[in-house]
Image (tube, grey):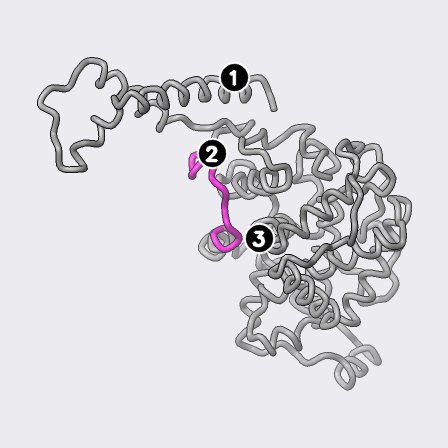
């Protein structure tokens, strides 16, 4: 946190303490007495000063680095609120870029027609296209909603109650490769951040996110958490385009919840493999490649595993990684790690080479 931010929070703490003290002496109660049906006959100078100070506190705007957020600064944003933002803004220029399904020719097209998954129902295709369109959108630091999404992810993973700069080394601590998270969204766009938001804003999946985050900071098995998440979002995008999720989407008559659950289930599987098979950053490329094959081949199996885990969480019985020892809290910066992502791997089939 920079000096300006620290100074702001110190000043705010002092002011809050002063307000609290005034409350204890009953002075501020006079300010709200009218609402309770009692009007003071005389308003003293001390009460007026307290009222001015209270209004000054209410008008403070928290700095977020490059700019102050004008849209509910400092407040967490839910997944649904962020999604609604994308449903209401004009995304036509991004939508032109998407290719909703994989193009197949010759024997590949015939094999897919005969033995492949069913096509997505017509009524669900607009929702599918929205998912793929969001994956084309980049991070705009000037958009207050984008900033709130980043702030929410940071606060939920770190436990911080304060806003942080939108650019800075603290993002490397979360597992981005540099000081600007926007540079790591290649192939997944803003959908990668929406998936992280989904993971941390649900009370059940938040526990999972925190456990995986702790694993990512292990002194031996560390990996860049957010960068790994972006790769899993890429796998989810590919699975959607290759119609691997169509059967489940048709069954639930929804697309976005299925894609979200598939992302979470794939991340859960990765954490299990990483922990139990003692994987390290040197194994990242191989782990992601095997994970992509499994996820596309058996999406329902992954989703069922997630259901069992979440059911255990609701009963207070689930532990993602089993009996855990305390992991080291200090993780090396991701720039010190050699991480191999999905985009860095040689294609294993002609159908898996597309990148957005």
Residue in the picture at 58% in, 64% down: 257
Quick check: 15 above or below 116? above
Residue 76 painted magenta: yes
Other-residue count near label 3 (Cα within 10 Å), few / some / many at <14 / 14–19 / ≥20: few
The reply to whether residue 157 is visible in this rendering is yes
Quarter that holds the N terminus:
top right
The first of marks 1 and 2 along the sequence is: 1
Cα separation, mark 1 vs mark 3, equals 32 Å
Quick check: 266 above or below 300? above
Quick check: 19 above or below 210? above
Residue at the disc numbered 3: 203
For label 2, the SS is loop
Callouts 1 and 3 close, C-beta under 8 Å:
no
Cα separation, mark 1 vs mark 2, equals 18 Å
The first of marks 3 and 2 along the sequence is: 2
Out of 41 and 119, give the one closest to the viewer. 41
Residue in the picture at 88% in, 45% down: 280
Mark nearer the viewer, 3 or 2: 3
Out of 199 and 356, give the one closest to the viewer. 199
Percent x, y of residue 241: 69, 67
The first of marks 1 and 3 along the sequence is: 1
Out of 190 and 308, give the one closest to the viewer. 308
Percent x, y of residue 70: 43, 34
Quarter that holds the C terminus:
bottom right
Residue at the disc numbered 2: 69
Mark nearer the viewer, 1 or 2: 1
Out of 148 and 327, give the one closest to the viewer. 327
Left or right of residue 65, residue 113 in this image? right
For label 1, the SS is helix
Q: Which mark is residue 7?
A: 1
Residue span colored magenta: 69-81
Other-residue count near label 2 (Cα within 10 Å), few / some / many at <14 / 14–19 / ≥20: many
């Amino acid at each position: 946190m920079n000096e300006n931010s620290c100074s702001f929070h110190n000043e705010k703490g002092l002011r809050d303490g002063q307000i609290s003290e005034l409350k204890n002496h009953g002075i501020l109660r006079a300010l709200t007495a009218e609402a309770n049906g009692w009007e003071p006959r005389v308003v003293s100078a001390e009460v007026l000063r307290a009222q001015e100070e209270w209004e000054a506190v209410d008008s403070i705007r928290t700095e977020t680095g490059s700019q102050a957020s004008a849209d509910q600064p400092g407040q967490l944003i839910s997944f649904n609120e962020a999604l609604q933002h994308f449903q209401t803004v004009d995304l036509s220029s991004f939508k032109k870029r998407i290719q909703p399904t994989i193009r197949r020719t010759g024997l590949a097209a015939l094999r897919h027609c005969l033995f492949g998954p069913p096509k997505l129902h017509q009524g669900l295709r607009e929702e599918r296209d929205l998912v793929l369109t969001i994956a084309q959108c980049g991070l705009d630091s000037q958009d207050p909603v984008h900033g709130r999404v980043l702030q929410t992810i940071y606060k939920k993973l770190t436990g911080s109650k304060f806003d942080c700069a939108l650019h800075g080394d603290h993002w490397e601590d979360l597992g981005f490769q540099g000081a600007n998270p926007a540079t790591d969204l290649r192939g997944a766009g803003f959908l990668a951040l929406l998936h992280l938001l989904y993971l941390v804003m649900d009370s059940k999946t938040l526990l999972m996110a925190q456990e995986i985050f702790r694993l990512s900071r292990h002194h031996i098995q560390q990996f860049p958490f957010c960068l790994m998440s972006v790769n899993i979002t890429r796998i989810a995008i590919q699975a959607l385009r290759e119609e691997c999720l169509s059967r489940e989407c048709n069954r639930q008559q929804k697309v976005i919840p299925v894609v979200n659950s598939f992302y979470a289930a794939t991340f859960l599987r990765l954490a299990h493999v990483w922990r139990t098979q003692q994987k390290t950053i040197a194994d990242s490329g191989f782990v992601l490649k095997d994970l992509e094959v499994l996820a596309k081949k058996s999406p329902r199996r992954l989703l069922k595993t997630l259901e069992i885990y979440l059911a255990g969480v609701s009963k207070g019985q689930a532990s993602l990684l089993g009996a855990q020892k305390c992991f080291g809290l200090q993780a090396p910066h991701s720039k010190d790690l050699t991480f191999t992502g999905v985009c860095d791997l040689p294609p294993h089939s002609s159908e898996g080479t597309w990148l957005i």
